[in-house]
Image (tube, rainbow, N blue to C red):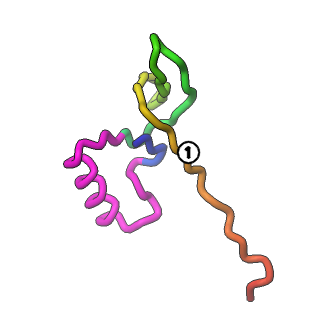
Amino acid sequence: IVERNPRILPREDEDVSKAIDERFRAEGVRILASHAATRVERQAGHWAAILSKGGHETSVEFDAVLVALGRRPNVKGLG
C-alpha cells in the first residue's frame, strides 16, 4: 500500500489507523506511508511504481494497481 499521508486511513481515528496498519503488516502487507507515486514504468519484464519521499525516488514492483483519489460529496438539494 502506498499512502501519501503519514499513516493509512488518515481521516479515521489514529488508534483505528494504527490497528489496521499493524494487522496488515502482520498479514505481510507492505505499507509505504509518506510516499507519493509519481509514475509507473515497465522494467525488465515487470511493472514498477516509482515512488518519491523527501526528494528521493525508489522503485517498487507490483501485481495490481488500485487508484483512490477521494470523492466530492453530492449534497446538492440537501438542507
Residue 35, horizontal then vertical, whole percent: 45, 37
Residue at horizontal 38 percent and vertical 51 percent from the top: 7
Local SS, label 1: loop
Residue at horizontal 39 percent and vertical 53 percent from the top: 8
Q: Is residue 49 left or right of residue 14?
A: right
Query: Furthest residue to the right?
Result: 77
Q: Which quadrant is the N terminus positioned in?
A: top left
What is the crowding at mark 1: few (fewer than 14 residues within 10 Å), some, or many (at least 20)?
Answer: few
Which one is nearer the viewer's eye here, 35 or 45?
45
Of the residues shown, which amino acid type is indicated by label 1? Answer: Val
Judge whether residue 55 can be spotted in this image.
no
Q: Is residue 38 left or right of residue 44?
A: right
Which one is nearer the viewer's eye here, 34 or 77?
77
Q: Is residue 57 above or below residue 79?
A: above
Judge whether residue 13 can be spotted in this image.
yes
Task: Please give the range of residues in magenta.
Answer: 6-31
User: Where is mark 1, residue-wise?
Assistant: 67
Residue 56 appears in which quarter of the rendering?
top left
Residue at horizontal 32 percent and vertical 65 percent from the top: 16
Q: Is residue 60 above or below residue 29?
A: above
Which one is nearer the viewer's eye here, 29 or 5?
29
Residue at horizontal 43 percent and vertical 40 percent from the top: 2
Residue 45, horizontal then vertical, whole percent: 46, 14
